Image: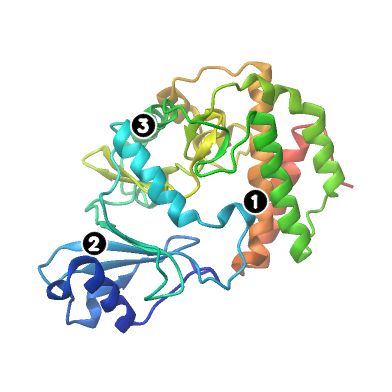
Amino acid sequence: MDSTTKNRQSTGTLRAMVARAYGAAQVPDEDDAFTELTYGFFNALYRVRLRDGRDVVLKIAPPADVPVLTHEHGMLRNEVAAMDLVRRLTDVPVPRVDHVDLTHELCDADYFFMEHVDAPCFGIAADAGELDADVVEAGFVELGRLNAEICRVVGPHFGPLAGPGHATWREAFSAMVEAVLADGERVGVDLGWSVDEVRGVLAEHADVLDLVTEPRLVELDLWAKNSMIRDGRIVAIIDHERAMYGDPLMEAGLTGLDLPVFPDPAPFARGLGLGVLEPSQATRRRLYTLWLCLVMLVENPYRGQSQEQFRWAREQLDTAMGLFGRSRG
């Protein structure tokens, strides 16, 4: 996927990065040792073949002067912190991080190297029909189980891993909604709804957020295309950049409960250990879907995405508002 946030670098700069991370003896001579991986939406990503034949992955944050959403500032640092938490506190498989550079000396952004996991992307393989139906279902159950293990990690506050922290989930989630609404207003995004209408939905139902009293580590973006599968097993979870402390019901694998365009959430929910939602849980999940739709819509101009993608995102926002009895026009 192309995006204005992708911070592509020259081969010379990539070689300098390899030298700093692995030493001059590992810098490859061949230009084709650097392969851009294009399916991500935000960061630049390269597979690099080191001189000794090992493959590693380089991830580079957006350029310093490219506007991003409020919650996207410092996301690469957040990802490194999240991977460390998951590695230390769970048995969930994540790639090994080899080197992190936050100096901005070689390029105008943070970057890190991690091991290359030699396995197909679960979501891509499933969409391409390369996996049997029972393997796909089992993969989603396994994703839910791994997600449940991540969510057992208890944080010191609600909100971003590094702060600012909030004492209550209502405060943290309300701040998330306000941030994305401000991001949209900053670039003149037409939501199809007034910000007061959106705020009204949150205000009407915010009491259910008070039922969440313990901040849990949530990935927010753990879906099939952020996992790797080999021999029918999930062998790695990638892209932890959006992780935060919040409510496990916010996990991406449950989005299909509210938006039919997303995958059937039933296998994921089974792995997560989640049965039929109580009314208050269903309301919370719908609020999280509303926030996600706002993000998908507002990020469009920040990414330079197509008008077709913008229309699709606005349709999802209409659906989310409809879950609360709101209709446009």
Q: CA distance from mark 2 to mark 3?
A: 24 Å
The residue lying at 22 percent from left, 75 percent from top is: 33
Q: Callout 1: helix, strand or loop?
A: helix
Say which amino acid is labelled 3.
Answer: Leu
Nearer the N terminus, badge 2 or badge 3?
2
Q: What is the x, y in percent for residue 110?
A: 42, 64
Residue 295: image tag: 1
In the picture, residue 231 is in which quadrant? Answer: top left
Disc 2 to disc 3: CB gap under 8 Å: no
Can you say whether 61 is above or below 222 in the image? below
Say which amino acid is labelled 1.
Answer: Val
Question: Callout 1 environment at 10 Å: few (<14), some (14 to 19), or many (20+)?
Answer: many
139 or 17, which is in the foreground?
A: 17
In the picture, residue 280 is in which quadrant? Answer: top right
* 225 with respect to 216 (left or right): left
Nearer the N terminus, badge 2 or badge 1?
2
Residue 146: image tag: 3
Q: Is residue 253 visible?
A: yes
Disc 1 to disc 3: CB gap under 8 Å: no
The residue to which callout 2 is attached is 56
Q: CA distance from mark 1 to mark 3?
A: 25 Å
* 198 with respect to 273 (left or right): right
Q: Callout 3: helix, strand or loop?
A: helix
In the picture, residue 212 is in which quadrant? Answer: top right
